[in-house]
Image: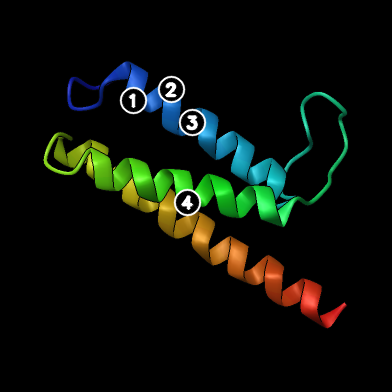
Amino acid sequence: MSKDVDQYFFNLITMLASSAWCQLGKIQDPVEGKIKKDLKGAQITIDMLLMLRDKTKGNLTKKEEEMLASAISNFQINYADEVTKCKVC
């Protein structure tokens, strides 16, 4: 782990990322071992990441900011893709 990224911050982002990927149906739920979508839950997780970004503004290292921005961007793109797929279904 780099000095530029706090281990607890990294673990928090990783935990939220894991939840978001499960909610988007991209990976198996670790408890049930099944792929399932929860787009409402995914939106809440994305909103939590956005809130975290806003509340920590000015208190993160450059690498932490980049990591958080990348996670938010990836989830927003994947969320939009999944919503579009569900509308076509």
Q: Residue drawn 34% across and 25% down? A: 9
Horizontal side of residue 55 vs 26, given as left or right:
left
Tell me: residue 58, above or below residue 2: below
Q: CA distance from mark 2 to mark 4?
A: 18 Å
Q: CA distance from mark 4 to mark 1?
A: 17 Å
Three-letter amino acid code of the residue under disc 4: Asp
Circle 2: element type: helix
Q: Residues within 10 Å of mark 3 (few under 14, many from 20)?
A: some
**Residue 21 placed where, x, y %?**
64, 45
Read off the residue under disc 3: 14
Three-letter amino acid code of the residue under disc 3: Thr
Looking at the image, how many numbered discs can be counted on the residues?
Answer: 4
> Of the residues under marks 4 and 3, which one precedes in the sequence?
3
Q: Is residue 86 visible?
A: yes
Q: Quick one: 77 or 52, which is closer to the camera? A: 52
Circle 4: element type: helix
Q: Quick one: 11 or 55, which is closer to the camera? A: 55
> Of the residues under marks 4 and 1, which one precedes in the sequence?
1
Mark 2, mark 4: which one is toward the viewer? 4
> Of the residues under marks 3 and 1, which one precedes in the sequence?
1
Q: Residue drawn 38% across and 50% down? A: 50
Three-letter amino acid code of the residue under disc 1: Phe
Q: CA distance from mark 3 to mark 1?
A: 9 Å
Read off the residue under disc 4: 47
Read off the residue under disc 2: 11
> Of the residues under marks 2 and 4, which one precedes in the sequence?
2
Q: Residues within 10 Å of mark 1 (few under 14, many from 20)?
A: few
Circle 1: element type: helix
Read off the residue under disc 1: 9
Q: Residue drawn 30% across and 45% down? A: 53
